[in-house]
Image (spheres, grey):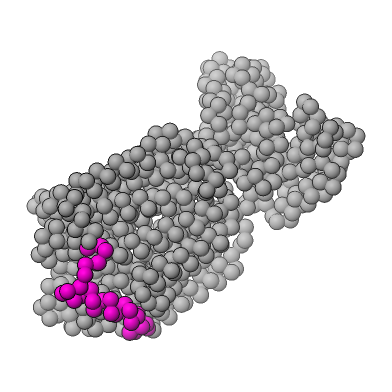
Amino acid sequence: MATFLYKLGRLTFRRRGFVALIWAALLAVAGVGFATASTDTSNSFSIPGTEAQRAFDLLEERNPGMSADGATARVVFQAPGKEKVTDPANKAEISGIVKELRSGSQQIAQVADPFQVKAVSQDGSTAYISVSYKVSSMELTEATRDSLEDVGKEAQKSGMKVEIGGDALQVMPHTGTAEVIGVAIAAVVLVITFGSLVAAGLSLLTALIGVAIGVGTITALADVLDLGSTTAILATMIGLAVGIDYALFIVSRYRAELAEGREHEEAAGRAVGTAGSAVVFAGLTVVIALAGLSVVNIPMLTKMGLAAAGAVAVAVLIALTLVPAALGFAGKRIMGRKARAAAEQEESPDAKPNMGTRWARFVLRKPVWVMLVGVLGLGVIAVPAASLEMGLPDDGAQPKSTTQRQAYDMLSDGFGPGFNGPLMVVVDTRNSSDGKAAAGRVAEEIESIGVSAVVPPVFNKAGDTATITVIPKDRPSSHATEEVVHGIRDAGGDVRADTGAEVLVTGATAMNIDFSQKMNDALLPYLALVVGLAFLLLMLVFRSILVPLKAALGFLLSVVAALGAVVAVFQWGWLGSLFGVEQTGPIMSMMPIFMVGVVFGLAMDYEVFLVTRMREAYVHGETPGQAVVTGFKHGARVVTAAAVIMIAVFSGFIGSAEQMVKMIGFSLAVAVLFDAFVVRMAIVPAVLALLGRKAWWLPRWLDRVLPDVDVEGEKLQKQLTEGSGSEGGESGERELARV
């Protein structure tokens, strides 16, 4: 592989104009697709194989006019002072709002008058209008949302406090500020790392081009492929982080080759042949981790993972082709004056060892202590992970300034927390001899469980399917509400045995519970798949068993520690105000498995880049200890910069008002912090120092079976040493043309 990539690097450097033209054309196509794409992204959410989804599908078949999975809204009214919503003036105002809502949009399926459905609190201070729509929240038009908001503003003129809850006002989170902050910090880090504006700008520009192409393509295909609103955000987050990192790896190695006196084209070839090999395998681990999300069998998550994997693949291709082409355009300016002077000083025999070298030597002197401090430190931080509770955030997790959060609080105060998450119980009576009696028994069973209210069964026109609305006592994301759902399902088994009627629990709250359970069940199989495939991949790269094993175990340690930090902040509320957490609660159920997928791939970036350089030095004759020092001498600065950039990019998303985006940004930033600086920069060299030559041991039979991908460039080095390097560039074009 190193030989092929060496030839590719020289070819793209020499034909840089043609390569740049190809990428410019791809960028233009993606830009046109982005500009002409539909602004309405899908947010269709289905969980195949769950009871909640079967209930939705049954209602869609038996009672399609009900729009069970459509968007909902609640317009909540609170009378001022000692007034009541039942006072004539207030009642007339609310009744007028009901009529206005019914005529406000063709997407509305039903508007419930609070005075007819008893949606008035016992003290008369609060009432709410329930609005259901024919389509999901992301399929609502702007005109429909505007009419809902206008009704709320108009109603406030009456003197009542009016707020709107539900998912009808849910829109795609805006994260432009987060991206700008991340890019700005990345630019500063790159300038400090390279000491050259040209080198920093080149790395940043090529990464942004890759993100623009990836996100533009995703946006253009969103309508066709039914991609969710958060897919582009994820692709931006991951694509930007790895794109900058991969460009950083190539440019750094290119400058190192120039510092050793290589010609520019030769330096580009060697940079792509060595660092490019690490980029390819690091990128493959990220792609495997993201594409592996499909094993969870949740369409939305599968599409998010595949789209982000596509963005990573684009970042790899950019690093292997556009970056060396851009290096050709940059010429001597890629090395600033200070950078050239520093490079000459570093190569001098009397030069002081750099920070990476000094740190590696310290670890080699105290490997046991460094390993113990790292493992115990992460172990302590991981303790809260034992209390992990998973769920999906409701409007109670929104900022207190939002109308959704205020409506949530008003409903909780006026009716009880459970009114924010009603359950829908579906009773299929087609196989029952007496459907009404069966539905009645279900209602009685639910009442005996202990809930706030049970609305009598409502049958469809055919009379074979009934729906029962259940109001729990506690808030939607609470453990008590989850127990109510399980209690109804347990009682449903007895009802079916006695009457033949099937009982299904659904609604947004039940869907969230089923989603959390499915994610929990999929975590270990997914972890085994991703770690297993990546272990095999790293075994190919390092020609070792213990090095990949150490990489996987170190990753697990950093992930559990990151989960502990997430639980402490978002579930327990420690330092919550610092990160803008206004409401503690269960951890978003998709976050752990998502974090495993993303962070595993990203962590392997540092493992591959840092340890490949050690492997390269070891293969070329250095002792295991010397190889560790060499790896840190050349790689520590780059890996540190790459990690800081990733942390900066992810941290930028912590400022999002959207709880899901905030939690993902925090978890990824913390996980990269732990993995890069504690695991890869401390525990890994300590373990390698303790293992010595055993770290690179591989059974002979396995060595013969595994294909030799030559990531460390041993074959390439032999060819270049034998004098074939000058011919490599000319023959490379012919070979690539045949490929």
Q: Position of residue 225 (x, y in %)?
A: 52, 56
Which of the two residues, 656 or 310, is positioned nearer the viewer here?
Answer: 656
In magenta, the rendered stretch is 329-357
Report which quarter residue 605 is drawn in: bottom left
Residue at 68%, 24% in the rendered image: 453
Helix, strand or loop: magenta stretch: helix
Q: Position of residue 283 (x, y in %)?
A: 34, 60
Q: Position of residue 732 (x, y in %)?
A: 23, 79
Quarter of the N terminus within the rendering: bottom left
Q: Position of residue 9 (x, y in %)?
A: 28, 76
Q: Is residue 116 above or below residue 644?
A: above
Report which quarter residue 357 is drawn in: bottom left
Please tell me how many numbered marks the rendered image carries.
0
Residue at 48%, 67% in the rendered image: 184
Q: Is any atom of residue 79 visible in this view?
A: yes
Residue at 27%, 82% in the rendered image: 264
Residue at 42%, 53% in the rendered image: 669
Quarter of the C terminus within the rendering: bottom left
Which of the two residues, 132 or 274, is positioned nearer the viewer here?
Answer: 274
Image position of 56 (left or right of 545): right
- Is residue 340 on the magenta stretch? yes
- Is residue 255 on the magenta stretch? no
Which of the two residues, 674 or 94, is positioned nearer the viewer here?
Answer: 674
Image position of 67 (left or right of 42): right
Which of the two residues, 549 or 649, is positioned nearer the viewer here?
Answer: 649
